[in-house]
Each structure stands twice: as C-alpha cells, then as structure tokens.
C-alpha cells in the first residue's frame, strides 16, 4: 500500500541525528512494548507480513509522528483486537472484561532463549526453478495495490539488472492477507540511481532491492 | 528528556513528557489485560529484554568481521553462505535467519537501509538504533547517501562508488568494512574493538588503532 511506511526518496524528514552512546531503550515502556510484541507474535495467530501491514495501515500522521515502539504497540493492539484476544473496551479499561480467544502457544520465560535462537525462517521450496538468472535485464512492475507489498514506490516500473538469485521465500503480498504463503523466487535487482531518480542523480550510486519473481518482467 | 532542555522550549518538552507518560499508561494497560487473561508471561518479557540488553548486540557482528579480516577461508565462506558462516560462531535466530555479508572495497562502499520498515540483522547487531527506524534515514539513504554519511562524519574518497541495499525481503545484510591500515599484528579480539556498529550498517568506517584506544 502507498502508506506512510514507504519512505524511500521522500523529502523534508529532517536530519538523521544519530545519538552518541544511544541506549537500547529510551523508556521502560519501550522494553515492555518489545517483549509484548514478541510474546504475542508467538501465539501463532498472525505472521510477520500481517504485522507489518497492521503497522503501515496506521494513519500517516500517526505513523510519522510515532517512535517505532509506539508504531509496534499500536500495530499490536490492532492485531489483538482483529484476532479476538482483547477488545477495545478492555484496552480502554486497562483490565480484563471477558474471556477471549485461546492462542495456540503462550511464550513462557523458560522457552524464550530457544524461541529467539530458532527465529522464523521463511524460505520455502518451490516446484519450478528460477525464471531469471544473474545478469538478466528486468523491469519492475507498475502497480499501486491498497494491500501489502514489498515493492517500494521508488522502485516500480524501473529497469534494473538481476545480480543474484537469493532463494525462494514466502510471498508477503499474499501472506499478509491470509491468502497463503505462495512462495516465489527472490532476486537482488540493482538499479542505477539515474534510472530511479533521474535528473541530478548521483552517478556513482546504485541501489538494490530484493524482489519477488512476480514483481519482475524480462526486457 | 529534560537533559535536552537547554533551548528552554518548555512547551515542547511538556508535550514530549506527556506523550511518554501516555505511552507508559497505554503499554501498561495492554500488559495488564494480557497478563490477567493468561496470554503472556511477564517473566518472558523480562527474559526477552535481558537477551537484547546483555546477550545479543554488535559485539557479535564485530567478531564476525574480525574473523573475516583474519581468515581468508572464513571470508570466502561468509561471501558464499553468510548464514552458515555466522552460525558457526553461534549467532543465529530471530532476524538473522537469512544473512548476507557485503564487503566494502576501495571501489565500493556499502550502505544498508530498510525503507519500508525496520529490517535489521538482530542476530549480529542486536536491536536497531532509533535513527535506523526513523523517517529521516529511511527516506534519504536511497536518494542522498553521501548527505546521510556526512551527518555521521563520514566523507568517502573521491570516486568511491556507493551501493545501497534496501532490505525489502527477508535477507538481512551486514557490511564487512575495510580493515584499517596498521593492524597486521592484532589478534581477533583487538580487531573486533575497531569494528563499530555503524561500520557494519555502512554509516561508519572501522576505527583506526589510534581511535580504537
């Protein structure tokens, strides 16, 4: 979706302003927000693509003025309500009002180390070989879906070169919306800055994205 | 927040402090509801926080870089199968499942960004800094990387190309910075001291031995 999350090439966002000796957390609630997000992810009720879509669906003014842990918290509230674990009334009241849905799994302290060390690999086998090979010239798709996609606006309808075949992975555009994992080949595609940004682009700059096969056509 | 109040802009700081307490209350409410429903274990949250505060951080990545600088065979393995090479040091798991290592050279400097969200190689660098997840870096890294680098105090040599890697899929990138000159005699732990977090994102360079002291 063309939401506030799709930031590549936007102007006016200000300086990067790195902090010296930045702490991992700037407030206690950020620690709890991290832990809550990971704990609730372990329910197995939604996948990473659906959570990304919940965050990018926040109103742009909210998204752009929030810290990332606030974005996570707001996204998590949406997912918990959507999947029947908590109600809006409970979040407003700050305590339980009714029994909700039971998750498949509950993350307990003794299983945290194992769960984090295992992670969530999302490479999947596909029956057919890759359509493209390193060195192939491709054009990215031009589309503007209201649904989740990982093809940023700045890289749509652009010509580039396949640099590497990276394996086959869950297709987020489908997986975010409960349409199945439908894995596809993923390629690193590199563009000259001039192709993306046109006049005034840095001639010594190239930019790459990792693109699912369905984003690409041969030229 | 009061440590930034030298400009005397009290209105803004009140707003910021209020917002922080709003978020504190909001997250507290969420945790309370989930705990009362038996859906979360607050001790699991403590364990997650402890993991990323004390166990998983950029020292992991620095050891990967130091080993690559010291052992050509390991550097080759890292080039060809970064996930396995990094796992051989014990660094695996969440947001490091599919790793790629990109090597800086005299010709090309690499810079990593996630324009669409906050994708970052947690297994080797830990949790991302705030700036990495914020709109200024995510918007500008792909269009004005030299301007971004200047804000980190980095000016690349004339003629060095820049390659920006936008982490749009589930591959997670670590930059292998160039080894500083004059480090021939150093062991891997001493070399790792020269490898900053930013040098593995591409917003910095490895420190020289003088800076590393």
Image: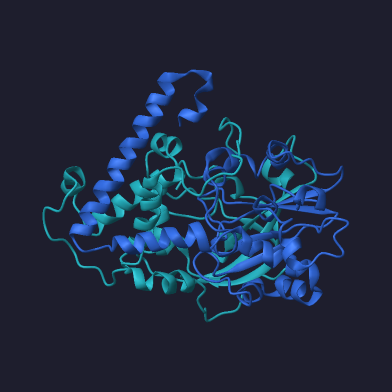
Chain colours: A cyan, B blue
- How far across and down, in percent of the image, does residue B180 sit? 83, 55
Image quadrant where residue B157 sits: top right
- Residue drawn at 80 percent across, 46 percent down: A204
Compared across the picture, whether B98 is left or right of B9 comes to right
The front one of B178 and B103 is: B178
- How far across and down, in percent of the image, does residue B24 sit? 32, 42
Residue extending furthest toward the bottom: A127
Compared across the picture, whether B197 is left or right of B169 comes to right
Residue B74 shows up from this direction:
yes
Residue extending furthest toward the left: A98
- Residue drawn at 61 percent across, 40 percent down: A20
- How far across and down, in percent of the image, does residue A38 sit? 38, 61
Residue A217 shows up from this direction:
no
- Judge whether A16 appears above or below A24 on screen: above
The front one of A176 and A27 is: A27
- Judge whether B187 appears above or below B194 on screen: below
Please count the marks in the image: 0
Q: Which quadrant holds the C terminus of chain A? A: bottom right
Image quadrant where residue B81 sits: bottom right
- Residue drawn at 48 percent across, 72 percent down: A117
Compared across the picture, whether B73 is left or right of B173 comes to right
Image quadrant where residue A48 sits: bottom left
- How far across and down, in percent of the image, does residue A175 sit? 41, 64
């Amino acid at each position: 979706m063309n939401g506030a999350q799709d930031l590549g090439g936007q102007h006016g966002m200000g300086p990067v302003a790195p902090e010296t000796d930045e702490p991992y957390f700037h407030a206690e609630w950020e620690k709890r927000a991290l832990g809550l997000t990971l704990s609730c992810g372990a329910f197995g009720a939604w996948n990473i693509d659906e959570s990304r879509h919940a965050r990018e669906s926040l109103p742009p003014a909210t998204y752009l003025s929030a810290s990332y842990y606030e974005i996570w918290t707001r996204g998590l509230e949406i997912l918990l309500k959507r999947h029947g674990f908590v109600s809006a009334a409970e979040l407003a009241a700050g305590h339980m009002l009714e029994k909700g849905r039971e998750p498949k799994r509950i993350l307990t302290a003794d299983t945290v180390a194992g769960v984090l060390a295992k992670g969530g690999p999302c490479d999947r086998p596909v029956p057919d070989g890759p359509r493209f090979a390193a060195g192939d010239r491709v054009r990215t798709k031009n589309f503007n879906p209201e649904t989740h996609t990982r093809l940023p606006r700045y890289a749509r309808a652009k010509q580039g070169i396949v640099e590497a075949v990276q394996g086959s992975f869950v297709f987020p555009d489908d997986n975010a919306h409960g349409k199945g994992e439908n894995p596809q080949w993923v390629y690193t595609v590199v563009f000259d800055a001039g192709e993306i940004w046109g006049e005034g682009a840095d001639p010594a700059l190239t930019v790459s994205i990792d693109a699912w096969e369905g984003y690409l056509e041969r030229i | 927040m009061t440590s930034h109040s030298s400009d005397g802009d009290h209105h803004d700081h009140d707003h910021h402090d209020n917002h922080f307490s709003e978020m504190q209350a909001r997250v507290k409410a969420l945790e309370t509801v989930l705990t009362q429903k038996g859906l979360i274990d607050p001790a699991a949250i403590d364990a997650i926080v402890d993991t990323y505060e004390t166990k998983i951080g950029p020292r992991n990545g620095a050891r990967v870089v130091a080993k690559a600088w010291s052992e050509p065979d390991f550097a080759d393995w890292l080039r060809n199968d970064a996930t396995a090479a990094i796992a051989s040091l014990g660094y695996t798991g969440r947001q490091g499942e599919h790793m790629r290592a990109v090597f800086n050279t005299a010709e090309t400097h690499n810079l990593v960004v996630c324009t669409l969200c906050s994708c970052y190689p947690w297994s080797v660098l830990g949790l991302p800094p705030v700036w990495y997840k914020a709109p200024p870096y995510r918007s500008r890294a792909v269009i004005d990387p030299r301007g971004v680098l200047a804000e980190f105090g980095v000016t690349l040599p004339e003629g060095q190309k820049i390659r920006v890697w936008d982490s749009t899929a589930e591959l997670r990138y670590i930059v292998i910075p160039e080894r500083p000159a004059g480090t021939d005699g150093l062991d891997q732990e001493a070399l790792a001291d020269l490898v900053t977090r930013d040098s593995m994102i591409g917003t910095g360079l490895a420190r020289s031995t003088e800076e590393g002291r």
